[in-house]
Image (cartoon, helix red, strand yellow):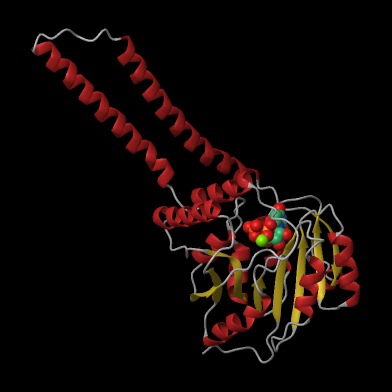
Amino acid sequence: MREVPKSPRLGIIIPVYNEQEVLPALLERLNSLVLGLPLSILFVDDGSTDRTLAMLQEACKRDARLACLSFSRNFGQQAALVAGLRYVRGDVVAVLDADLQDPPELLNEFLAKWREGYDVVYGIRKNRKEHWALRAAYKSFYWLLSRVSSIHLPRDAGDFALIDRKVVDTLNTLSERNRFNRGLRGWVGFRQVGVPYDRPARQAGRTKYNLTRLCNVAIDGLLSFSAVPLRISGWLGAAAALLGFGFLVYILALFVLRQPLPDGWASTIVVILFLGGIQLIVLGIIGEYLGRISEEVKRRPHFVAQSRLGWLSESEDDA
Ligand code: UDP
Ligand code: MG
């Protein structure tokens, strides 16, 4: 059992990007949420261009538990989470999607686990409602990630989680640019447990991820947690060398058996294309890592904030 603070406070982080369709339903659900402990909710507006910010402004005026940090442009969900973790208040912190795919009522179950002594309680998606092709892609990504990464990353766990304050503070000390928050959450250690849940479909509005953005998140995840792609170059080199050697043996055999030797043009082209392809792949992989290193070296902030609403407007520290 955990030594729970006398009256623990729960902070909830919700990244929002053009969510005007779902926001009323979300506010309604949060309003009727019964968790039995005081709440403070931090929206991170990731540069919305619709009425999201105006609606949040209204909501913050009505309800003192709400606050909003808004970015100067769209920096991406991972950056919004970085900001949320930095500014959220509470002894224990929850991360939710705005579209109600992470049912807030489930936090009761998460809190029970937290009281038992777990420091990180994350949701595991039991069945996904997405298209089967997307589901297959997710499945292979999580499979690949758990195979090649150097640490244990739970499969099918998203950003939906309840995190103890000490873990939040630890996450805030990590400064890397290419953030894959659910990976870092696993990386920091402490006592972690997954809670399976049925992930409903998005309640309103449209997903903010197209295939390219999803692939980018996947590549970030893979490259931040594994050096295996770099090692692939070695394997490819070995495979090419082996193939070349086989070809040499074949030609020597023809020579010894006094068979006519092949004319040579086709085989030369094949070898050149094969080796050229491998070299380009390997260069691409090295380039991916190099690009990330240069991002890290520049040390730009994860986000630029432009305004604060609700309880956040009272605090003076820099965004
Ligand atoms: N989101 C964000 N910035 C972005 C894209 C998404 O803050 O650039 C937020 C979005 O408002 C939502 C959450 O991240 O609260 C998850 O997005 P979405 O539901 O579109 O992703 P999906 O569930 O389809 O993977
Ligand atoms: Mg969603």
* Quadrant housing residue 198: bottom right
Name the residue located 86 percent from the left edge and 78 percent from the top edge.
63
Q: Quadrant of ligand 1?
A: bottom right
- Residue at the image position 61 percent from the left and 75 percent from the top: 162
The residue drawn where x is 72% and y is 51% is 75
Farthest residue, direction front: 132
60 or 204: nearer the eye?
204
Q: Is residue 268 left or right of residue 41?
A: left
So how many labels did they put on this image?
Answer: 0
Point out residue 137 in the picture as x, y percentages from the top left corner. 51, 51
Residue 154: x and y in percent read: 47, 65
> Which residue is pictured at 55% across the width and 75% down the height?
121
Residue 307 placement: quadrant:
bottom right
User: Can the viewer see residue 82 in this picture?
Assistant: no
Above or below for 185 versus 286: below
Foreground residue among 108 and 184:
108
Residue 83 x/y as whole percent: 71, 61
